[in-house]
Amino acid sequence: MIEYSSRRFEFMRWLIFIVFMLSYILVYFHRMSPGIISHELMGAFDADGVALGSLAAIYFGVYAVMQIPSGVLADTLGPRTAIILGNTLAGTGSILFGLAPSFPVAMFARLLVGLGVSVVFVSIMKNNAMWFSERRYGFMSGLTLFVGNMGSILAAGPLAAILEIFLWRTVFIFLGIVSLSLAGAGILFVRNQPEDLGFPSIREMEGKPWVPKTKQHWIRDLVGVVVVPKLWAGFWVQFGMIGGLYAFMGLWAIPYLRDMYSFDRPWAARYLTLMLAAFALGSLFLGWLSDRMGRRKPILVCGSLVYVLVWVVMVAFPWSGGAMIYVYFFLLGFSGSALVLTFACAKEIINPHLSGMAVSVVNTGAFLGTSLIQPLFGFVLDMGWDGKMINNARIYSPPDYQNALFMMLFFGIIGVMGSLCIQETYCMNISDGQVPVLNKKDCLHNNGQGNASR
C-alpha cells in the first residue's frame, strides 16, 4: 500500500473538482442564455424563429457530434487535456460571439463555443470516476449537475438584471476571458488520476481488485462500448426527455411566457429560474436518493412519467398564468433531473476504464435531441405566425404554442419508453467488459464493494 497524506489527497481532488465545476457553470450559462437575450438576437441579426432556433441549436448540434469523441479523448489523453483545450476554444468563441458583426459570424462563434464546452461534462464524469468512490458516484453526478445548473440560474434572472446595465455583447466577451483563465488553471492544477500525484488509485484505497486497462486500440474499445444494447436506453431517455427540456429552458420558455402572458423579461426570468433551480436541486437529491436506495431504474422511470404527465396537463387542459405556472415549471425541472441516473447506469455496465465513452454515448442523446427540437419548435411557431412583430421580433399566438407543446409531449413519451428499458445496476459496476449481469442478492452480498466480476 502506498503511503500518502489523506489531507493532501482530499485537498487536491476537491481543488481539481472546483476547476471542473467553474468550467461547467459556464457550459450551462452558454446553453441557457440565448433564451434570455432572444429579443436582442432577433433584433441584432434580423432573425426569424427558425434562424433564432438554429443559432441556439448549433451549440447543441456540435455538442452532440462531439460527445463520443469527447469520451475517447477523456479515456485516452485524459480529462486534463480535454478541459484545457475545451476552455481555450469556448473562451475564443465567446469573445467572437460578443464581437460578431453578422449572423454568419455569430453562428460560427456559437459553433466554437459548443465545440469547446462539449468536452467538459464527459471529462468531469471521467474525473469523478477516477477520484471518487463508486458508492458516491450517484451523489457526485448529482452534485455535478447541481453546481453546473448554477450557470443556468445565472443565465436567467441574474442575466436579465445584468442586461439592464451592460450590453449582451460585453457579457459574452467577459465570459470568454474567464474561460481562458480556467484553461490556465487546468494546466496548473488538474491531473488525470490520483497516481499522477503519487497517490494510490481509489480502488487500491478501498481494497478492491485492480482492473487492467484494455490493450487494444481505442477504436475497438469504442466499438465494444457502443454495441452494448442496454447502454442505448439511456440515450433515448436523454434524447426525448432532456432534449425537450433543454430546448424549452434554453430558448423557448421566455418567448412562451412573453407571448402567452405578456410578461416582461425580468418577470418571465423568475419562472425560468424556478425551473432551473428545481432541475439543480432534483439532480442533487435524486442522485443521493439513488445511492441511498441502491436502485437507479425506479427513480428514473418515475421521473420520466411525471415529466410527460405535466406536458399532458399543459396541452390538454386550459390554464392561466400565475401560481400554476410555478407548479408546472417546478415539476418539469425536478422530474427532468432524473436524467442524472442515466450516467450512473451507463458507467456501471461498462469496463471502468471506458467510463468516458459510456457516458458520452448516453449524453449524445440530450444534445442531439435539443439540436433537433429547438429549430423544430421555431418551425412549428413560424407555420402559424400571423405577421405580428414588436421591435423587429416575431410575436406568436397561443394556438402556435399549443401545437409546439404537442411536439414536446411526443418527445417526452420517447423518453419514458427509454427509461423502461434501462438495466438496473443496483449502484455498482456489473461489468469488466463482458457485462455479466448480477441479481440483487449477489449485489447485496457484495455490499456495493468492488467490481461485480467474479
Image (tube, grey):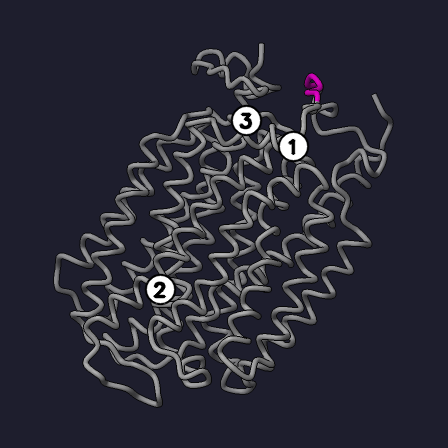
Question: Residue 180: x and y, percent?
Answer: 72, 66
> Residue, x 31% and y 53% (percent of image)?
331
Question: Residue 165: x and y, percent?
Answer: 54, 87
Q: Quadrant of residue 420?
A: top left
Identity, as a three-letter code, of the amino acid under mark 1: Trp
Give the numbered dot on residue 375: 2
Mark 3 surroundings: few (<14), some (14-19) or many (≥20) residues within 10 A? some
Helix, strand, or loop for circle 2?
helix
Q: Which residue is mark 3?
A: 224
Q: Which residue is mark 1?
A: 218
Q: Is residue 107 left or right of residue 423?
A: right
Helix, strand, or loop for circle 1?
helix
Identity, as a three-letter code, of the amino acid under mark 3: Gly
Q: CA distance from mark 2 to mark 3?
A: 34 Å
Q: Which residues are magenta?
A: 208-212
- For residue 376: magenta? no
- Extreme-top residue of the structure: 454
Q: CA distance from mark 2 to mark 1?
A: 35 Å
Q: Earlier in the sequence, mark 2 or mark 1?
A: 1
Mark 2 surroundings: few (<14), some (14-19) or many (≥20) residues within 10 A? many
- For residue 209: magenta? yes
Q: CA distance from mark 3 to mark 1?
A: 10 Å
Determine whether label 2 and label 1 are within 8 Å by CB. no
> Residue, x 40% and y 43% (percent of image)?
338
Q: Main secondary structure of the magenta part?
A: loop
- Quadrant where the N terminus sits is top right
Identity, as a three-letter code, of the amino acid under mark 2: Pro
